[in-house]
Image (spheres, rainbow, N blue to C red):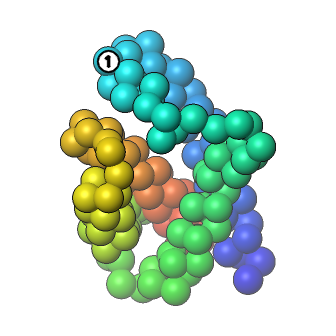
Amino acid sequence: MKKILTTGLIAGCILFILSYGGLFLAVRFFPALFVAYNNPLFNSDGSRDILFYMHAFIISFALSWFWDRFKPLFKGGFMTRGLEFGLVYAVIALVPVMWISFSSLDITVATVLSWLLYGTIQAIIAGVVFAKVNP
């Protein structure tokens, strides 16, 4: 359990920094993609903002547990194992969530694809960290 918490915390810190740095770069270089966020669907009164900022840690702890449980199934070097881990997560979790999000919310295909790409990159980065720290 300690290894799960430790690797989850390490990956959470890395994802937190990369996610928010990446967000600022994405807004700067792909501003048209973020026009969709002017939709009332995304407006918040600020009372739950902390939940948004905790996302990197929540996903990291969940993925850390998943890694610890299934790591023997991933073969190769740490980069290969991390990549495969991230892709497996994307297929079994992100694709169904993006499907239901697109089918039930007023969001664009570009938004859904950007979320899918973002989540896949997060999972790959977390997978590489887990493969290196908790082989």
Q: Nearer the viewer, residue 43 or 35?
A: 43
User: Where residue 74 sits: x, y (%)?
Assistant: 35, 77
Report if residue 12 is visible in the image.
Answer: no
Report if residue 119 is visible in the image.
Answer: yes
Left or right: residue 111 versus residue 2 is left
Which residue is disc 1 drawn over?
Answer: 32
Identify the residue at horizontal 31%, vertical 74% (top origin).
92
Q: Residue 30 occupies which quadrant of the picture?
A: top left
Left or right: residue 22 versus residue 1 is left
Single out the residue that lies furthest toward the front. Answer: 40
User: Where residue 133 sits: x, y (%)?
Assistant: 60, 64
Identify the residue at horizontal 52%, vertical 86% (top origin).
69
Identify the residue at horizontal 26%, vertical 39% (top origin).
108
Rendered view: 102 above or below 67: above
Label 1 sits on a secondary structure element that is helix
Label 1 Cα crowd, 10 Å radius (few <14 / some 14-19 / many 20+): few
Q: How many marks?
A: 1
User: Where residue 122 sits: x, y (%)?
Assistant: 46, 50
Single out the residue that lies furthest toward the left. Answer: 109
Q: Nearer the viewer, residue 30 or 101?
A: 101
User: Where residue 9 sits: x, y (%)?
Assistant: 72, 59
Q: Nearer the viewer, residue 96 or 106?
A: 106
Identify the residue at horizontal 73%, vertical 71% (top origin).
5
Image quadrant for the N terminus?
A: bottom right
Rendered view: 31 above or below 133: above
